[in-house]
Amino acid sequence: MPSMVQNGPRNNPQAQKPHSNFPNKPRNPNSMARRERIKRQRESLPIASVKELLVEEVKTHDILIIVGETGSGKTTQLPQFLFNAGFCCDGKVIGITQPRRVAAVSVAKRVAEECEVELGQKVGYSIRFDDKTSSFTRIKYMTDGLLLREALLDPYLSRYSVIIVDEAHERTVHTDVLLGLLKNVHNVRSNFIKDHDNMDDKKSNNRTMKGKGTGTQCTSFLKHCHGRKFPPLKLIIMSASLDARVFSDYFGCARAIHIEGRQHHVDILYAFHPEPDYLDATLVTIFQIHLEETPGDILVFLTGQEEIESVERLVQEQLHKLPEANRKLLTVPIFSSLPSEQQMRVFMPASPGHRKVILATNIAETSLTIPGIKYVIDPGFVKARSYDPVKGMESLIIVPTSKAQALQRSGRAGREGPGKCFRLYPECEFEKLEDSTKPEIKRCNLSNVILQLKALGVDDIIGFDFMEKPPRAAIIKSLEHLFLLGALTDDCKLSEPIGHQMARLPLDPIYSKALILASQFNCLEEMLITVAMLSVESIFYAPREKKDEARTAMKCFASPDGDHLTLVNVYRAVDRLLEKRKMEVVNEKNLHGKNEKFLRNWCKENFINGRSLRHACDIHSQIRGHVEQMGLCISSCGDDHLQFRRCLAASFFFNAALKQPEGTYRALASGQVVQIHPSSVLFQSKAECIIFNELVQTTNKYIRNLTRIDYLWLTELAPHYYAMQS
DNA sequence: GAGCACTGC
C-alpha cells in the first residue's frame, strides 16, 4: 500500500496541455455552475488525494494492480491523470475496458463532460454497433470483447500506450482471455525495447526476443514484430474486491495498490437459524422492514422470473390483510427479459409516503444501480449457468452465492447513506461460502474462445497461460468440435479458408459455419436472418397473465417446419411492415421517431420483445456486411424450404435428436434422453428427426430452437460424423 | 405443457 503523502504539482515537460486541440463547449451561467460543481465533485473523490502518487506508480511500474473500492473514482479519474501526465504523446491512446456496454458509454460521457470536450473527440467510446471515437480520441472506453476483436487486426495493440482493464474481478470470459493476451503483448513490447537497448545482452531467457531489428522473434505466440518499433505497454488491472493477489501473482508479483472508496456503512443482519423456505423468509422480512424500519426502499435478490412473480403475488396478498394505513408498499419486478418500458419502473420514485420494494435478479447486482435503496434482502442464492462438455449440455441451476457476491449485494444498501442488509442465512453459513464466484471461463463452452485464440496465433491452447486454466476436457471437446466443423486442420491449425472466415465473424462458431454452408445451399438470405435471431435473447415475450393471447399471436408466424423458419417469418414480417410504412409516409417529419413508436406498438400487439428484435436487426446488418466482404453468395431459397432445412442439417448435424417410442427424444451425439421445450412450435408435432440449437438442463433436459429434418440427410450431409457412428 | 441470472463480438 502506498503512503498517502501528497506530492506537489510537477512540472512535467512531457505533459500535454489538456484538450488544447479541441473546441470547448460554449459557456453560459448554467454550464459555469455545472462546471464548478463537477470540479468540486472531482476534487472530493478519494482518488484525487493520491493523484501524483498514482501517476508516479504508473511511470515506475509497467504493470500495476489497483484495488479501488466503490466510489473511489478510479474509472473516471485515472485515465485523465495519465493523459495530463503525458501518456498520450505521439498520438498514443489510453484504452479502458469494461465488461458491459452501458458502463463504457456512461463513463465516457461523464469523462468527456469533466474534460469539457465533445464526446468522440479527446474522450470517446467504442462498443459493438456504436463507435464514438475519432482520430483525436486519446481516452477510449470500450468493452473488453471489442478490444479482443481489435487484437485480431492489430496483435500488438500498437496504438495504445496504456491499457486499463476495469472490473477485472468480475472475471468474464472476455476479461480472462484479454488478460492472457495482454500479458503476452506486454512481454513482447517490453522485450522489444530491452532488445534494442541492450543488443549484446546474452542473458536472454526464453521470453527475450532473438535477432536484431527486423526479423525479431520471441517464443511467445506473437511471433513477428515486422521490424516495427513499439513502445512498452503500460498495463493496469483494476478490481473492486480484495483479491489483488491472484492478479499480482499472475503478472509476476506485480505491484498492487489500494485506493480507499467512499461507501456508507451497511449493517449486516443474519438469520438465527437456516431458513427451510427462503421465499417465505423473504416475504416475512419484507413486511418486517416495511412495518418496523424507517423510510427507504427495499431491494430483494431473487434467482429468476418465476420467483419474482410469485413473491410479487404473495406480497400483494399479504398487503390486503393489513390495515389501510400500512398498505403503502409498491412492488416493482426487474429482470433482463422484461420489456424496457417495464424495466424503467424501478427508476420512478414511489408516491409520497410509499415504500418501494424491488424484486430483482442479478441484474441489480452490477448491471444497474437503482437509487433510493436503503435495505437489501439477500436470501443467498443465484441461478448459475454451467456447461458439461461431455454431454454438450448447459445447465441453469440455483446455487448459493459466493462471499464476494454477498458483499456486492449488501453494498447496494450503502450507495446514498447508511443502510441495512438482511442475509437470510446464519453467519456460520456465510463462512462456508466460496470466496468468489468461479470464473466463467471454467464453466462455459470454449469453442468461441479457442477459435479466437487460434486466430490470434495461439497454437497450443492447453499450454496457454490462462489466469485460471479451463478444464482440460472442455478444451479437448471444443477442439474436437471445431475440427468437426472444419475450422481446424489435422495438425490443429486454423483451416483456410473456413477457419479464418469463421474466426472473422462475431458469432458462435457453429452459426458462422452455417453461414458459410448456406452460400452453397443457396439460402444465405434465410440463414443470415436465422443466426441473427438465434444470437439474441428470446424474440417472443409471453407474460403469464396473457399466455393465451401470446400463443395466438405466435401462431401467425409459426412454420410447420420448426422454429428456425418461424423466426425467419417474424423478421420478414417486420421487414415488410417497415417497407410498407416507408411507402405510405414519405413526407412525414421525424419519420425515424415515429417508426420507432410504430414498431414498438406492433411488437406489443404481437408479443415480441422489441429490444431483442432491434438487437437481431443490428446483428443482421453487421454480419451481412462481413459476409459480403468475404465474397459469399447471398441468395434466397425462396419457398424451397427443403434447401434451407438441409442446410440446417448439414450445419447442426452435431445436434440431432430422434423420437423415441414414448414420445421423448434421444440426442444422437451423447445418447441423452431429452424433451422438446414447450416454447417450440414443434412441441406438439413430434417430428421423427430434428436438429436443435440448445440443450439446457433446468427442471428437465430441454432442447430449444428446432427444425424437423430427414434422418437420412445426416449420413448424406455429415458422413464424417455419422458414417463412423452407424 | 415450461419458465430463461448476466455480459459480449
Image: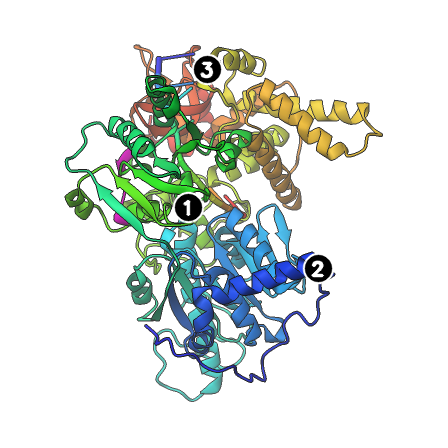
Q: Nearer the viewer, residue A184 or A642?
A: A184
| Above or below: residue A443 compared with residue A328 | below
Give the x, y percent position of residue A668.
Answer: 34, 26
For the record, the magenta segment spans A397-403
Q: Is residue A55 left or right of residue A575?
A: left
Q: In this orientation, does residue A572 appear?
A: no
Q: In this view, which residue lies farthest toward the bottom?
A: A200
Marks 1 and 2, Cα distance to the nearest angstrom? 36 Å
Q: Amino acid at mark 1?
A: Thr
Report which quarter residue A558 is drawn in.
top right
Q: Which residue is mark 3?
A: A545
Q: Which residue is mark 2?
A: A29
State the SS at label 1.
Answer: loop
Work out whether mark 1 precedes mark 2 in sequence or the reverse, and give the earlier one. 2
Marks 1 and 3, Cα distance to the nearest angstrom? 29 Å
Q: Amino acid at mark 3?
A: Glu
